[in-house]
Image (cartoon, rainbow, N blue to C red):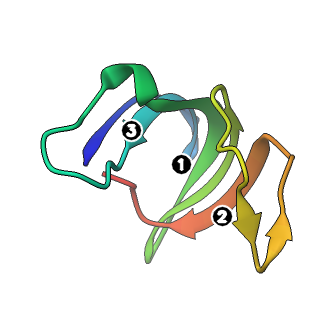
């Protein structure tokens, strides 16, 4: 496993902020066969809002290197963007 992330956070006001992020990573089946040329990369942006229970996050990510033959719930996927809604910081 090789995984890396970077995130730039900017607070606007009143508990609201924006972010830009870049992610890269992959998992290899055999020990010591890691090839950084095989890294999957994605970029995106999002909104943050401070709540009493943690930071509410709304992110949109775009796959720069999509996963071929990706299936979700048994269905082939060709869409390169993803939407994520969560509570709490990713890291």
The image position of residue 66, as x and y in percent, is 68, 37
Q: Secondary structure at mark 1?
A: loop
- According to the image, label 2 marks what residue? 85
Q: Of callouts 2 and 1, which one flags the residue occurring earlier in the amino acid sequence?
A: 1
- According to the image, label 3 marks what residue? 25
Q: Secondary structure at mark 2?
A: strand
Name the disc covering residue 34, or none.
none
Depicted 61 relative to depicted 73: above or below: above
Q: Residues within 10 Å of mark 2 (few under 14, many from 20)?
A: few
Q: Residues within 10 Å of mark 1 (few under 14, many from 20)?
A: few
Q: Nearer the viewer, mark 3 or mark 2?
A: 3
Q: Secondary structure at mark 3?
A: strand
Depicted 76 relative to depicted 21: above or below: below
Q: Nearer the viewer, residue 14 or 87?
A: 87
- According to the image, label 1 marks what residue? 15
Q: Are the residues at dot 3 and dot 2 in contact (C-beta closer than 8 Å)?
A: no
Residue ID at (38%, 38%): 25
What is the CA distance from the residue labelled 1 to the residue labelled 3?
Answer: 31 Å
What is the CA distance from the residue labelled 3 to the residue labelled 2?
Answer: 21 Å
Q: Nearer the viewer, mark 1 or mark 3?
A: 3
Q: Nearer the viewer, residue 11 or 45?
A: 45
Residue ID at (32%, 23%): 36
The image position of residue 75, as x and y in percent, is 85, 71
């Amino acid at each position: 496993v090789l995984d890396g992330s970077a995130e730039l956070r900017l607070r606007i006001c009143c508990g609201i902020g924006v972010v830009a992020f870049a992610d890269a990573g992959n998992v290899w089946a055999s020990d010591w066969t890691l090839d950084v040329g095989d890294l999957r990369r994605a970029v995106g942006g999002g909104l943050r809002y401070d709540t009493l229970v943690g930071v509410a996050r709304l992110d949109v990510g775009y796959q720069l290197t999509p996963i071929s033959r990706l299936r979700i719930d048994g269905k082939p996927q060709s869409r390169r963007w993803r939407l994520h809604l969560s509570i709490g910081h990713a890291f």
